[in-house]
Image (tube, helix red, strand yellow):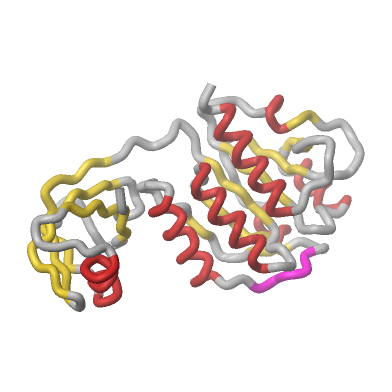
Amino acid sequence: MQLFYNQDLTQNDTEIRFTKEESRHVVKVLRKSIGDVLHITNGVGWLFTAEITLAEIKNCVAKITSSTLQPERSYKLHLAVAPTKMNDRYEWFLEKATEIGIDTITPIICDNSERKIIKADRYEKILQSAMKQSLHCYLPKLNETILYKEFIAQDFSGQKFIAHCEEGDKKSLKQSLKPSQDIIILIGPEGDFNTKEIELALQHNFNPVTLGETRLRTETAAIVACHSVAFINEL
């Protein structure tokens, strides 16, 4: 199934008119014609089935024949991840986390962060592409970049974890997770969280966890955390 994305589509709409770029993709690349069926999501859970009524390279129109609200997971996962020095590694994380299942991503700027500016527009396109490729109907929310100290001071519900590499009394994330509960996990930069940042997280009731015996890159740690949450909730 080929999944398209249109954020403005609602369950009350009766047709969809594709942009010039999308129309070209549908008609010329996918070779769709009048009567063919397409599937579209608006990124907030709705899956639409539509039948092409006009198939022109610059103007493709489809009549919506059905709409279904897809079920949500029993939990919400929020990963707060420091931007990586190499931008393509963060993009890889965004893509894979979307495929596995994530709801919110917040880039956090820490004391050891080497990158403090992100390409939000490009990141959004990667999230959209990964959502369509994995046939999800919920587009993850990408929050604005925020300083760690400002982020940690916010109120969060559910389970709260900080993954770090310093010595101390830590359980593994898999041992600590409880299914069907909202989760937020902090993942630091290449140089890890410093002692003050870890102490600040503990003061705000974040539980320290380990992601394994080996030292992981930021993007790898984020994917391990994402997969651990998905795995625990599949049991």
Question: Along the horizontal axis of the image, is 131 left or right of 19?
Answer: right
Residue drawn at (16%, 69%), measured in percent from left and top? 60
Q: Is residue 114 magenta?
A: yes
| Residue numbers of the magenta segment | 113-117
Along the viewing direction, whichever of 102 and 168 lies nearer the viewer: 102
Q: Can see residue 14?
A: no
Res 72 visible: yes
Residue 32 image position (x, y, % from top left): 19, 62
x and y, in percent, of residue 108 in the image: 67, 60
Q: How many marks?
A: 0
Find residue 206 and report its image quarter.
Answer: top right
Q: Is residue 81 left or right of residue 29?
A: right
Residue placed most toward the observer, 48 or 59: 59
Q: Residue at x 43, y 48 (%)?
A: 134
Q: Relative to 205, is 114 above or below?
A: below
- Judged by its main secondary structure, the magenta piece is loop
Against 209, residue 217 (above or below) is: below
- Which of 72/182 is in front? 72
The image position of residue 197, as x and y in percent, is: 81, 52
